Image (cartoon, coloured by chain):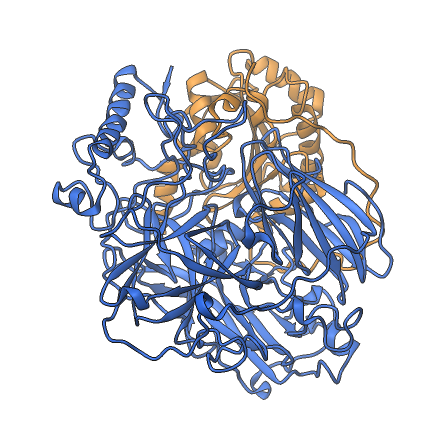
Chain colours: A orange, B blue
Amino acid sequence: MTDLRESARRRYFPDLTLRTQDDKEVRFYDDLIKGKIVTINFFYSKCEDVCPIVTSNLVKVQELLGDQVGRKVFMYSFSLKPKEDTPKAMKEYAEMHGVRPGWTFLTGKPEDLELLRRKLGFTTPDLRADKDVTNHTGNIRYGNEPFMLWGACPGMADPQWIAESVEWMVRPDAVHLPHEHTPAHPDAPRPEHRHHERPAA
Amino acid sequence: MYFNVFGEKVSKGRFKQMVNAFKNRQELIAAGLTSRRDLLKLGLLSASGMLLAKHGLSARAQTATTPTSTSPGSFNLCLPGNQAASPTTRAFVEPLPIMPLAQTVPVSSLSPAPTIAPNTAGGEVRAASHQAPLLNPSMFPFPPPRVYQVRQHAIQAVQSPDLPTQTIWAFDDGFHATSPGPTYRANYGVPQLVRNINALPPANQNGGFGMPSVTTHLHNGHTPSESDGNPCDFYPSGNFCDQYYPNVLAGFSFDHRPTGDINESLSTLWYHDHRVDFTAQNTYKGLLGFYCLFNQFDTGDETTGFRLPSFPQFDIPLAFADKVYDPTTGLLAFDLFNLDGILGDKFLVNGKIQPFLQVQPRRYRFRLLDTGPSRFYEFFLTDPNHLGANNPFFVIANDGNLLPAPVQVTSVRIGVAERVDVIIDFSSFAGKTLYLENRLRQINGMGPVPPQGLVPGQVECSDAFGNLLSDILPAGQGNLLLQFRVSGTKVVDNSVNPMLDHPTFYALPDTTATPRVTRTFQFDRLNGQWSINGQFMDCNHFRFLVQQNSVENWILFNATGDWTHPIHIHLEEHQILSRNRVPPPLAVEHSRKDVTQLRQNERVLLFFRFRDWLGKYPLHCHNVIHEDHAMMGLWNVQPQGDTVLRP
C-alpha cells in the first residue's frame, strides 16, 4: 500500500517550496497534501471572469463543510500568475472574499506553479488553448491522499453539490441515501457564465 | 519554445531529436518497410506489433520512462500523449477468455427476501419501489422467474503472462468471479431480478484508484428508473440493490399494447458501474459485463428465427479496453489527474492483453464493445500477408440493435459504450491467421484526429514536413487487438449467409411523428469544465421533465470544436435524423442508437419516444472522463412534462 502511495507521490506531487498568503514557506507534498483530505483549484487574483464565481462558490463550500475545514479538510488555491500574485495580493483577495482559516492561497516560482498545474492536470491538449490561463480556472480537485481517492468537479457547480463531493472523501464508506427520485419542477435556469475555450490571442 | 508530446518544455536539441525520430519512422515507411515481416526482420517491431523504441526510433520512448499525467499529445507532429510506456508484453500467446454465463439462484437463497419497496432497514439502497410488478403483476410477477445474486469484490487476475497478477474488481454470480463479469443470457418475456451486493474492500484498500461505492447501469435497457443504475443511486460496501429487469419491448403500455413494439427489440446490452464522478476508475478496474437479450427471432440458435450464429459457441461478446501499466511495478495504473480523456498503450479483449481465438472456417457473430475509458476504434480485418486487401464483413447491429438488413463494410468505427454486432465469414480463410486491427489514429482525449480535408480553423495532424495525416493508419500499422487462428477443416454452418440469403431483420420505427418539444443541448467546455448548456452534473438538480409516452426531438450541438463526444441517453433509444442538417451518410447509422458520436463541429438531430417508465435518468458524454467531470445532466419522466427548450 505504501508503495502505491509512493508511486502516486512521485507521479503527481513534487515537493516544491511554495509561499502562502501569510508569506510562510511550505512544501507542497509534505505540508499540504501528505495525509490530508484536500480541495485544489487554480486562480489568479486579478481574474475578473470565472475566478470570483469559483472563489465565492468555495466560500459557501467552506461554510457548508463547517469546522471540518482546517481540521479534516484543507482547501488550497494555487496561483496561475505567481509573478503578480504576491502573498500580499493573495491575502487581500482572500479577505475580500471572506475566506476563513483552513483555506490557503499559494504562490511561488512561476516554473514551479507551472509544473504543479501540469502534474495536477489543469491543462488542455490543444497547446494554443493551454496558453490561455482562464481555461484552467474552472475545475476543483478533491482528494484523500492516504486513501488514494481523487476526483474533480466544476468550480461553478452548486456549492451544496461540491460540499457533498468533498464529504465522500471524508466518509467514503458511508451510505449516502439516494437522491430525490420524484422532482419538483426543475429550477429556473441559472445564470450562465459562458466562456468558450479558445486559443490565446 | 519547444514542447514534447507531454506538453512539457524541452530544449531545442531534444526537439530536433524528436523530429528526427519521427522522420526516421516516416522514411522507413516511405522505403516500403511497412510489412510486419520486414520490420520484424530488422528487429524494429516487437512481437506485440508495436514499433520498437530502438536507436531513437520512437520519440516517445525516451521520455516515457517517467510516467506523467501531463501528456496531452501533440497535433503538430501527430504524436500520442498520455501513454506511460507500459512494460513490454508478448502478444497472442494466451487464448481469448470467454465470459461464463451468469447462473440463476433460487429466490429462497436470497436473505433478506426481495421486496417491492426498498428494504432500507435490511441494507438495501434503492431509490423507489419496483414499478413493473406494481404496474402489471401478471406480466411482471414478483419475484420474477429468474433471480441472480451477484457480488462485486476484488479478485486476482492475470491480464498478460508478462505482467504481475493484478488486483481488479469483478462481478461474482456465486459460480464465477470474473472481469468482464458473467454474461447474462436474458429473454424477452422473462423478467429477472439481480440482487447486486457491494462487497468491495474499504476505500483505503482500493489499490491506488477506484471508489468502492457502486451503482450498476444496464446500458441500453428499457429499465424502470429505480433499477436503471442511476449514477446518483450509489451505495457502499455492505449494502445491496435489487434490480428488476422487465425484459419487455418499449411501448407495451402505450402505443403497442400489450407486448410492445417488436421493432424496438434490443440484443447486445452491457452492464457497468455508473457511480457519479468515479465511473472511469471503477469500470477501468473491471466493473462491467455483457447482457445479451434474445427473442423469437434473435434466438441464439442458428437453425431458428433469423438464423444468426449460435450463442455462445459462434456468437461471442468482445469487450475492448485500453490500459496503462506502471513501467516499474507492472501494475495497472490509472491517471488520476486527467480531465481530457485517458488512452492506454495496452489493448485488452475480454480482460487479456492481445489474445488469440481459435476459430473454424465458418461464420461467427461478434459483439464488439468499446469499454473505454476514452478511445475510439475503427475495426478492420487484417490479413498480414495481404495488407493491401480489403476484407469485408457484415455489420448486423448498431448499439446492439439489429439493423433493417446487414450492411457490408470493410471497417466500422465505434466510440466508448457503442457496440456493433458483426458477422465475419472465415470460410475463405481456412488455415490462415487474421487480425482484428484498430487503425484509427487517436493521440489524446479529444477523439480521433480530424479526417483529411479540414475546414479552416480545425487543428491539423501533420508530420514533420507539414503534410496532413489521415485519421486512418495504414493496414498493419494500427493496434492489432485480437488474432484469429482459422482452422483448416471444413465445418457445417447452418447460420444465415448475409451475402447470399439477403436476410432482413426489424424495420425502423417511424420517425415522422410531430415532436412535443425540440430541445437543444450544447456540449461545451467552460474554463476547463465540461458542461451541457452551461450547467454541470448535480444529483440534486433535474434539468427538465419529459412527458411520459411522448415524442421529442433533441439537438446535440458540439461547441467544443475539435473534440468528439460519444453521447449516451438512458431509457429509450433514438434515431439520428440528421448530422449537420443532412441524413447520416453511413448506412449503419440508419438504425436505433443509444450512443451517438457527436463529431467535430457537429449538430445532430435525434428522434425519441419516451414510453412506459417514470423517474430520473441521465444524458451524458460517455468518454467516461468527461462524464465523471460533470458533462452529464439529469432529467425525469413524469405524467406531465415541460417544454424547456435549452435545459
Residue B429, horizontal then vertical, whole percent: 28, 64
Residue A69, horizontal then vertical, whole percent: 62, 38
What residue appears at the point 58 percent right and 74 percent down from the top-left corner?
B195
Residue B450, horizontal then vertical, whole percent: 48, 34
What residue appears at the point 71 percent right and 40 percent down from the top-left corner?
A158
* Viewer-proximal residue among A183 and B188: B188
- In the image, residue B530 sits, relative to residue B414, either above or below, namely above
* Viewer-proximal residue among A132 and A74: A132
- In the image, residue B4 sits, relative to residue B201, either above or below, namely above
**Which residue appears farthest toward the front when viewing the image?**
B500
- In the image, residue B249 sits, relative to residue B556, either above or below, namely below
**Which residue appears farthest toward the top when viewing the image?**
A84
> Which quadrant would residue B96 be assigned to in this image?
bottom left
Residue B476, horizontal then vertical, whole percent: 28, 46
The quadrant of the picture occupied by the C terminus of chain B is top right
Can residue B117 be seen? Answer: no
Q: Quick check: B319 left or right of B623?
A: left
Can residue B409 be seen? Answer: yes
Q: Quick check: B316 left or right of B554?
A: left
The quadrant of the picture occupied by the N terminus of chain B is top left
